[in-house]
Image: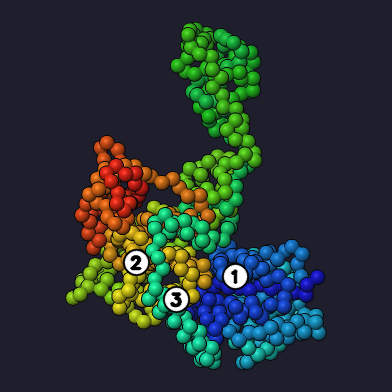
C-alpha cells in the first residue's frame, strides 16, 4: 500500500489579491500549482480540488468542492472522497500557493510522522507560524475530524486540527497571499521569469505578424463544441440550474401516473350498466372512494384516484342521470375506458432524459412528475462581462470624447437567452496591465466576455495578454463580416475567453453566432436544432465574405435581410426579428441560418 496520497487545494477566492486564480500565477517559470504537484510527485494518487484545469495530466484526479468556493474544509472533504478507493493510510494536504515548495518539505513531514505517530504534522514557516495547509494527516484522523463538524461550508482549517499534532519548521513553505508577497517571490526568481517572458513575447510577436487563417462560423462552432474543456459535473437541484446539461441519464424514481386515475370528468363505473350512483365523490388529491360493486358508479374528477373495481370512466358528455340516481350511457356514444393506468407513461427506471440533454422548464417538470428533483449536471455557464475602452461611459454625463455604453446593459439578457448566467459586469480602462489582471481573476467564472480590444490597434491589447497568459487559442479570427476580429481562447484555469469586436452590432451579432456553441462545449450539451429557411433577397446583400445582417420574417415564409446595416449601434435591430447568416456569393432563395433575437 502506498505511504501517502495527496490533496492539492487549487481553488479559493484569493480575496486579498482581488480574486485572482493564484494557482495559475507563474513564478520562476512555473505555476504555483506546478510547484505543488512537483512537491507531491513521490506520493501515490493526487487529487486537485478546484476549477477544472484542462492542461493537467490525466494521472491527476480533479474534483470540485460543492458548492464551489465553500472554503478549504469543504475542499479537503471533496478531495478525500475522491480518494476513497484503496486509500493510503496517510494524506498530504497542501494549498497551491507556495512558489518554493519542494519534495524535501514533504519528506520532512513524513519523517516526523514516522517518529512521533501524531495524527497530523504541519509545517511552520520561517517566522514559526503553523501552516495548516501544508500538512500530513493520518487518514483516519482526518475522517474523524471532518465527521465532528455540523457543516463543512466556509469553515477554517483550524476547525479540523486534532489534539495529537506536531509542528515542524520546514524551509520554503512561505505562501503568496498578497501582491507584495507575489512581487517579492518573483524578484527571487527573476532570472527564470525574465527568460520565460522573453519567450512568450516572441511568440506573441510572431502571432501578430503571421495570423492563422480565419475560421468559418461552422468551423468555429465545431472547434468550440469539441475542444472546450467540460465543466465539472455535480449533483444539485434541477430547478436551480436552468441552462445546464445532464451529465448522466435521468431515470424515473416512481411511476407515472402514480396510481390509476380518471382521465376525464365524469363517473367511475363498474360493469356494463345501468349503474346506481352513490353519493360520495372522488376529487383529485382527495380521499379515494371506497371500492365499487358491479352496477355501482361514483362521481369523479379528472386526476382523481379511481376506486377499486372500476372498469371505466363514463364521461360527463356521454352520461345521463335518470330518476332514482340511475346512470345511463347515452345512445351512440363510444365505450371508452378513460383511465390512465399506473405507470403507463413511465415506470421506475424508465429513461426521462439522456445524458447531454439541456435543463429546461420542460425537463424540470418531467423529472418532478416521476419524483426526481436532483440530477448530475454540468453548468450553467457563469459569465463576467468586461467592457473595454477609456471612451466608454456607463453612467453620468458624457465628457468630451466619450460615448455611451449602449450594449453592456443588454448583454446579460442576451447571454441569458443562451442559458448563460452573468455574475457581474466591469469596465476595464486602457492600461498596459489591465488585461493581465482580468485574465487571472477568473476562479469564480466559466466565461469571460470581453467587448473590444480584439483588433490590432494601439489600444487593442487583448491578444498580447492572451499570449502572456499561455492561453490556448481556439478561434484566432472569424471569416465573417462584421466580427472578423473575434477571438476565443481557453485559460490555464479552464475559463473560456470570448473576445468580441467593439462595435455594438458586431459584438452582439458575433455573440449570438457563437454563444450556443460555447455553452454546448462547456456543458457537453447536445447541440440544438438549427433554424433555416429561404433568404429571399440574398443577392442584394451577399458579399465575397459571409455576412451576418438583421432580418425579418417574410410573409411567404423565410426571411428578408436588411441591405444597409450600421455596426455603430443596434438601431437596425429594433424592427427586426433576428439575424441571418448570409453565405458568400449567395443567390436569392438560398437556404440560410436564422438566429432569433432574444425576447
Tell me which label, 2 or 3, sits earlier in the chain. 3
- What residue sits right under mark 1 in the picture? 56
Give the label on residue 485, or none: 2
Q: Please tell me whether mark 3 or mark 1 is closer to you in this view.
A: 3
The answer to whether residue 515 of the structure is visible from this angle is no
- In three-dimensional space, the C-alpha distance between marks 2 and 3, rounded to whole angstroms, equals 16 Å
Give the label on residue 467, or none: 3
Q: Is residue 27 above or below residue 350?
A: below
Residue 99: image location, x then y, percent: 58, 84
Q: Residues within 10 Å of mark 1 (few under 14, many from 20)?
A: some
Q: Is residue 314 above or below residue 462?
A: above
Extreme residue toward the left, this view: 400
Q: Is residue 60 above or below residue 374?
A: below
**Which residue is located at x 57 percent, y 33 percent?**
345
Q: Residues within 10 Å of mark 2 (few under 14, many from 20)?
A: many
**Which residue is located at x 22 percent, y 56 percent?**
565
Of residues 306 and 573, which is closer to you in this image? 573
Q: For mark 2, give the secondary structure.
A: loop
Residue 346: image location, x then y, percent: 60, 35
Amino acid at each position: 500500500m502506498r505511504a501517502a496520497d495527496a490533496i492539492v487545494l487549487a481553488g479559493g477566492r484569493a480575496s486579498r489579491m482581488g480574486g485572482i486564480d493564484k494557482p495559475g500565477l507563474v513564478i520562476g517559470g512555473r505555476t504555483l500549482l506546478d510547484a505543488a504537484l512537483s512537491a507531491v510527485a513521490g506520493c501515490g494518487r493526487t487529487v486537485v480540488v478546484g476549477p477544472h484545469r484542462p492542461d493537467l495530466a490525466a494521472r491527476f484526479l480533479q474534483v470540485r468542492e460543492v458548492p464551489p468556493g465553500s472554503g478549504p474544509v469543504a475542499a479537503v472533504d471533496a478531495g478525500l472522497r475522491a480518494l476513497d478507493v484503496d486509500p493510503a493510510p496517510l494524506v498530504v494536504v497542501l494549498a497551491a500557493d507556495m512558489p518554493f515548495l519542494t519534495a524535501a518539505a514533504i519528506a520532512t513531514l513524513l519523517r516526523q510522522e514516522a517518529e512521533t505517530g501524531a495524527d497530523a504534522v504541519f509545517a511552520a514557516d520561517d517566522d514559526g507560524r503553523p501552516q495548516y495547509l501544508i500538512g500530513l494527516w493520518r487518514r483516519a484522523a482526518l475522517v474523524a475530524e471532518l465527521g465532528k463538524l455540523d457543516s463543512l461550508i466556509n469553515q477554517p482549517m483550524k476547525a479540523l486540527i486534532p489534539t495529537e499534532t506536531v509542528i515542524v519548521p520546514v524551509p520554503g513553505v512561505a505562501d503568496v497571499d498578497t501582491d507584495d508577497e507575489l512581487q517579492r517571490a518573483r524578484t527571487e526568481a527573476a532570472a527564470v521569469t525574465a527568460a520565460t517572458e522573453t519567450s512568450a513575447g516572441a511568440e506573441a510577436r510572431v502571432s501578430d505578424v503571421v495570423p492563422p487563417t480565419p475560421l468559418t462560423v461552422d468551423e468555429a462552432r465545431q472547434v468550440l463544441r469539441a475542444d472546450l474543456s467540460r465543466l465539472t459535473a455535480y449533483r444539485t437541484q434541477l430547478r436551480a440550474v436552468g441552462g445546464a446539461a445532464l451529465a448522466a441519464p435521468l431515470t424515473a424514481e416512481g411511476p407515472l401516473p402514480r396510481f390509476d386515475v380518471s382521465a376525464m370528468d365524469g363517473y367511475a363505473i363498474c360493469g356494463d350498466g345501468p349503474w346506481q350512483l352513490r353519493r360520495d365523490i372522488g376529487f383529485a388529491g382527495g380521499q379515494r372512494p371506497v371500492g365499487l360493486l358491479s352496477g355501482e358508479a361514483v362521481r369523479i374528477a379528472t386526476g382523481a384516484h379511481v376506486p377499486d373495481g372500476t372498469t371505466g370512466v363514463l364521461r360527463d358528455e356521454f352520461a345521463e342521470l335518470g330518476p332514482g340516481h340511475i346512470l345511463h350511457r347515452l345512445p351512440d356514444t363510444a365505450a371508452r375506458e378513460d383511465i390512465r393506468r399506473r405507470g403507463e407513461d413511465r415506470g421506475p427506471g424508465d429513461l426521462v432524459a439522456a445524458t447531454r440533454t439541456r435543463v429546461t422548464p420542460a425537463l424540470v417538470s418531467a423529472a418532478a412528475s416521476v419524483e426526481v428533483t436532483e440530477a448530475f449536471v454540468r453548468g450553467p455557464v457563469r459569465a463576467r462581462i468586461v467592457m473595454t475602452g477609456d471612451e466608454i461611459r456607463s453612467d453620468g454625463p458624457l465628457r468630451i470624447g466619450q460615448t455611451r455604453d449602449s450594449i453592456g446593459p443588454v448583454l446579460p439578457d442576451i447571454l441569458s437567452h443562451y442559458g448563460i448566467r452573468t455574475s457581474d459586469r466591469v469596465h476595464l480602462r486602457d492600461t498596459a496591465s489591465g488585461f493581465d489582471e482580468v485574465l487571472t481573476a477568473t476562479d469564480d467564472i466559466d466565461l469571460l466576455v470581453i467587448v473590444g480590444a480584439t483588433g490590432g490597434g494601439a489600444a487593442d491589447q487583448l491578444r498580447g495578454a492572451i499570449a502572456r497568459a499561455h492561453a490556448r487559442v481556439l478561434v484566432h479570427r472569424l471569416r465573417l463580416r462584421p466580427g472578423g476580429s473575434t477571438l476565443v481562447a481557453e485559460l490555464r484555469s479552464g475559463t473560456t475567453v470570448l473576445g468580441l469586436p467593439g462595435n455594438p452590432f458586431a459584438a452582439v451579432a458575433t455573440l449570438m453566432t457563437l454563444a450556443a456553441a460555447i455553452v454546448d462545449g462547456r456543458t457537453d450539451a447536445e447541440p440544438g436544432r438549427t433554424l433555416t429557411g429561404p433568404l429571399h433577397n440574398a443577392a442584394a446583400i451577399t458579399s465575397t465574405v459571409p455576412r451576418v445582417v438583421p432580418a425579418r420574417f417574410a410573409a411567404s415564409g423565410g426571411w428578408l435581410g436588411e441591405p444597409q446595416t450600421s455596426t455603430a449601434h443596434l438601431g437596425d435591430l429594433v424592427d427586426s426579428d433576428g439575424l441571418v447568416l448570409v453565405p458568400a456569393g449567395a443567390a436569392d432563395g438560398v437556404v440560410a441560418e436564422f438566429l432569433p433575437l432574444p425576447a
